[in-house]
Amino acid sequence: MDENRFRIESPKSLAARVAERLREAIVDGEFALGAMIPEETLATQFGVSRTPVREALNLLQMQGLVVVRPQRGSFVFEADAQDVAALCEFRSVIEPRAAELAFLHDRVGATEALAAALAELEAARKARDAVRYSRADTRLHESFFAHCGNPYLQAAYALAGARIATLRTHLSAGTDVLSPAGHEQHKQLLALFRKGDFPGFDALMRAHVAGTRENYVRHLNERRTAPTRA
């Protein structure tokens, strides 16, 4: 007997659907870093009770996107220079290895995914659409993990992936979409990947991530010193 013949796909819970939409809103910059997330307002907008909203916020807390503070409420996470440095160090170590494994495990599929993301980056640049650019940038970097064939690497990246994508939107996409420098590095990364030149790929990825770190820290400093409006 086919053991899978009676298997059905379970529908997503209400909390999971709320969490999915909230995750998208946070990553795309609809909520500011550190912003309070109003449970009651969200419940009204979603047309649900506060229970699935709270469950959704707990799910997002496990992804590192939300901080739930007892008696105070739920907030979008905030980053500082130390957090940015740790995330970038993590990326510098894990992404080159994922790329090398993707080349060995699924070179054709990975190359196609990278090329598609690069084309979307170019389209976003032409449209001057920062959110679209950030999404394509995220797709490009996630492609290495999607095709690496190692579930442990994939799980490790997934733990930080949402924060990485959110910081990309909030701290760099607005300037990246106007500058050719990052886009040129992405094109060079694809060229090195196609050739299988992983010493060169590793060096360029580390330089790319180091530039990202500097950019993020500069934006964080600017946000901290910007005068508040009355």
Image (cartoon, grey):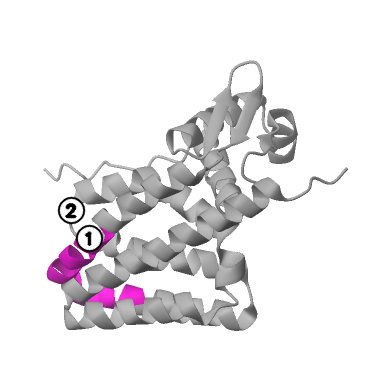
Q: In which quarter of the image is the N terminus?
A: top left
The magenta-colored residue range is: 95-114
The residue positioned 64% from the left and 77% from the top of the image is: 128
> Of helix, strand and loop, which one carries label 2?
loop
Task: Please name the residue that numbered disc 2 is placed on.
Answer: 150
> Of helix, strand and loop, which one carries label 1?
helix
Q: Quadrant of the C terminus?
A: top right
Magenta stretch, overall SS: helix
Write down the quadrant of residue 68 in the picture: top right
Tell me how many marks there are. 2
The residue positioned 53% from the left and 28% from the top of the image is: 55
Magenta stretch containing residue 106, yes or no?
yes
Looking at the rendered structure, the kind of residue marked 1 is: Ala
* Residue 16 or residue 181, whichever sits in front: 181
The mark that comes first in sequence, 2 or 1, is 1
Does the rendering let one see residue 120?
no
Which mark is on residue 98?
A: 1
* Residue 189 or residue 224, whichever sits in front: 224
Q: How many other residues sit within 10 Å of disc 1, few (<14), some (14-19) or many (≥20)? A: many
The residue positioned 55% from the left and 52% from the top of the image is: 27
The residue positioned 60% from the left and 24% from the top of the image is: 51
